[in-house]
Amino acid sequence: MFIRDIVAFLNREIPVSLQESYDNSGLLVGEAETEVQGILICMDVTEAVVEEAIAKNANLIVAHHPLIFKPLSSITGKTPEERAVIQALRHHIAIYAAHTNLDHLWGGVSFALAEQLGLMDVAVLRPLSSRLRKLVTFCPPAHLDELREALFAAGAGKIGDYDACSFNSEGYGTFRAGEGSRPFVGKLGELHREPEMRLESVFPDWAESTVLEALQKTHPYEEVAYDLYSLENPHPRIGPGVLGRFPEPMPVPAFLDLIRRITGIPVLRYSKGKAALIEKTALCGGAGSFLIGDALRMGAQAFITGDLKYHDFFIPGGEMMLVDAGHFETEQFARNALKEMLSEKFPTFAVLISDVITNPINYL
């Protein structure tokens, strides 16, 4: 097993195309053709984390925050980031980051925190639009089932909690096979009319190449006719933040104590809302102030995130409680999600969570 195999899996499960334009996710350091010995998962890549990887014989570090976030004009060891890169390269350690693409993923950063808090009926707080495509193709009825199943296996046909979704209608197609062609049906030079089924199915944009490959491989025709449409529909399973509810409403003091215990943060910053009992709750691991308006519109009684500024606390106008539970503290459970994902796929490798606490913030 090589690093390229792990990277291909991560890129498929946590598509890099889901990252924000300012981000730098993916394989950042190292050679893809190196054989994997072990994997170390962390929040941030520091010199101490690289030393830990060396000690534990892990030559692939999978981090949430990218080590190389801003462009490096030189790599001379003058900054902690440069020293970590040099140290990793010297010991043939690769570094991979899954940042805002993991933030947007169903089951990603915010979902991991929601699970720890015990939220139910969890949904994406701000579903991303323009990430869906529709494929329309035309196929002889006898080959429809095989083609449809191949497209589903390639990632098409998933809508929310449903899969194998498609629309099928009867019709006929016409064509004339020209010189040099080898038609599946019909004769050279003759206009042919063939009964066909129109097959429609949606898929996420990052699966386009896989879906089209399955179409070309499975369709019986020499020349496959198909249409691709970009959809404005929001993707219900992709986007930042989550919204959920507690099994039973809880008093505000109990709600705040739960957050403090689960995240391990000794001090909470929060604003008061109008609800005495908290049930419907929104959250965003990391820095989520941009979602305050979304949480308000969805009727959340509280919104949990990190990195809130002074003026952010005024935005809800007393209608909703805001809780700043820290950046590291609200994202830390993403490490467990990454470990579970990798361990399930690659059970023969040691997948370890770093013991190094990279949170730079201390509390007194």
Image (cartoon, grey):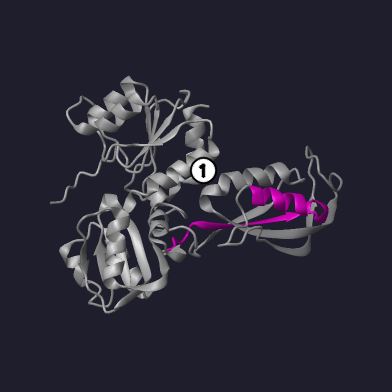
Is 196 part of what is drawn in magenta?
no
Determine if residue 286 is in view.
no
Q: Between 132 and 320, which is closer to the camera in this rendering?
A: 320
Residue placed most toward the observer, 4 or 143: 4
Instruction: Verify whether residue 137 appears in magenta.
Output: yes
**Residue drawn at x 29%, y 57% as measured from the top left:** 261
**Residue farthest along the top direction in this orientation:** 90
**Number of marks in picture:** 1
**Residue at which label 1 appears:** 12
Viewer-side residue, 301 vs 79: 301
Percent x, y for residue 343?
50, 38
Percent from the top left, x then y, of residue 194? 83, 56
What residue is rendered at 66% in x and 53% in y? 226
Whole-percent x, y for residue 182 in the image: 80, 40
- Residue 217 in percent (x, y) is at 70, 41
Q: Which residues are magenta?
A: 127-153
Question: Residue 5 vs residue 25: left or right?
Answer: right
Horizontal arrangement in the rendering, residue 65 relative to residue 145 (left or right): left
